[in-house]
Structures are given as structure tokens and as C-alpha cells.
Amino acid sequence: MQILYFASLKEALQLSNETVPVSPNMTVGTLRVLLVNKHGGQYFPNNILCAVNQTIAKDSTQLNNGDEVAFYPPVTGG
């Protein structure tokens, strides 16, 4: 599964993407835990948003091989 990082998250991690194997019954929530353990919790606070295959996803969203998962900070406007 391809993971993409955007905006300040990309800058903080100094990483634009990475590949992670999908485990059985993996969800966005379990992927977040894996990424927190790998990179540190400061990069994945509760307000970090996620999209799976370009559709906004919840932590309960099931992941599959070949999915594209994007993490990005919330956007603010002015």
C-alpha cells in the first residue's frame, strides 16, 4: 500500500511517501498506530486527516493491497 504525506506533515517527516505492507483486517486506525510507532506521535495528532483512494476515510475504513492512503493536516482558510 502506498502512503502519501502532504503539506506540513510532509515537511516534518521529510518524507513524501512510503510503502507499507497491508496486514489482515488492517484499518486506517491500525495504520495510524503503526505510523505513530514508526515516526512518533507528534506527527499524527488526532486532527491529521486521511483519504483512501482519494476519498475521505475514517479510522474504521478497511485497507486493502493496492490502496493509496494520504495523510494531511486540516486546511484553514482566511
Image (spheres, helix red, strand yellow):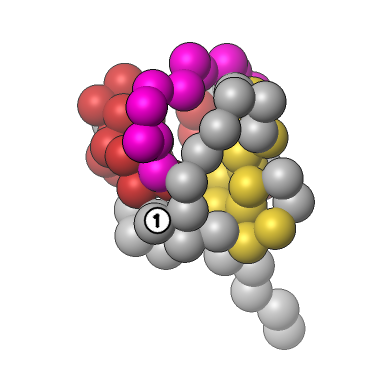
On the image, the x and y values in percent for residue 62 come to 47, 46
> Which residue appears at 74% of the width and 51% of the height?
54
Main SS type for the magenta part?
Answer: loop
> Which residue appears at 38% of the width and 35% of the height?
26
Residue at label 1? 59
> Which residue appears at 72% of the width and 45% of the height?
53
Query: Could you say which is closer to the camera, residue 67 or residue 70?
Result: 67
Q: Is residue 39 positioned above or below 70 on the image?
A: above
Residue 19 belongs to the span the image colors magenta:
yes
Q: Quadrant of residue 8?
A: top right
On the image, the x and y values in percent for residue 57 come to 55, 59
Q: Is residue 70 positioned above or below 19 on the image?
A: below
Q: Quadrant of residue 70?
A: top right
> Which residue appears at 50% of the width and 27% of the height?
13
Q: Please count the marks in the image.
A: 1
Query: Could you say which is closer to the camera, residue 36 or residue 24?
Result: 24
Residue 56 belongs to the span the image colors magenta:
no
On the image, the x and y values in percent for residue 31 come to 38, 36
Left or right for 66, reference 63:
right
Q: Is residue 5 positioned above or below 59 on the image?
A: above
Q: Give the farthest residue toward the front.
A: 24
Q: Is residue 10 in view? A: no
Q: Quadrant of the N terminus?
A: top right
Q: Amino acid at mark 1?
A: Asp
Mark 1: secondary structure = loop
Residue density around tag 1, few if under 14, some if 14–19, many if 20 or more, within 10 Å: few
Q: Quadrant of the C terminus?
A: bottom right
Magenta span of residues = 17-27
